[in-house]
Amino acid sequence: MVTASEVGRDLHLTVEGVAPYVVRPLPGRIGEQITSTYLQISVGLATTEDMTDAFRMALDGGVLDGDRYVPLPVEEQHNYNRLQDELRTAEAESILMPAFLWQTVLGLSGVTAFIEGGEGVAGGVKALWALTARLGISPSRTSPSSALDDLIQLQAVSPSTPSPQGGVKPGKQPRDRQPKQSSS
């Protein structure tokens, strides 16, 4: 389990037994780019390499290369390199996602949504829902293939439906009240 706290302008992410990962804020243009990449990968329009680059920039920053930002050189990716050396994959995800969400318009509320959502897939979907809602994006507009809708629906709690008095569903009779067939 990860814990998160904002210290000054930095985000400190801690996994038990490991020194905190200090994530510095990104300029808005990089934040917009990684947010766009995340939304694109959520609906199948970007590659996993694009998402890895977005996570690397969320953790360690980026540099302008032509008209796009790219991750810093590998030797300058201190947080990302530490993740690779110190953490299991699930623990690394619990650092990568909060770092990314903190760099978006959600800030600490996105980090909190991920952690309180249970981290992993469940926390990621809760945070994705919060991000799309915050950006005013309709899942049907962002995903003609409905992949985002599917992601959201998988995590949605199905509404409870009231049952008639006695717990009998419409059209069904309790077993002891059904007529018995004769065996003639």
Image (cartoon, rainbow, N blue to C red):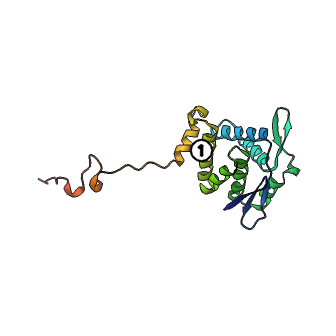
Q: Name the residue at 13% across, 53% down.
A: 182
Q: Name the residue at 88% across, 51% down.
A: 75
The crowd level at tag 1 (other Cα within 10 Å; few <14, some 14-19, many 20+) is many
20 to the left or right of 184: right
47 to the left or right of 157: right
Tell me the quarter of the picture where residue 86 sits: bottom right
Quadrant that contains the N terminus: bottom right
Amino acid tagged 1? Trp
Residue 139, above or below 86: above
Residue in the foreground of this view, choosing between 61 and 180: 61
174 to the left or right of 119: left
Name of the residue lying farthest toward the left: 184
Name of the residue lying farthest toward the bottom: 17
30 to the left or right of 162: right
Q: Name the residue at 61% across, 36% down.
A: 136
Tell me the quarter of the picture where residue 66 sits: top right
Residue in the foreground of this view, choosing between 5 and 184: 5
Q: Name the residue at 72% across, 48% down.
A: 100
Name of the residue lying farthest toward the front: 8
Image x and y of residue 129, in percent: 59, 44
Q: Secondary structure at mark 1?
A: helix
Image x and y of residue 177, in percent: 19, 55
Residue 132, above or below 118: above
Image x and y of residue 174, in percent: 24, 55
Q: How many marks?
A: 1
Question: Which residue in the structure is indicated by mark 1?
Answer: 129
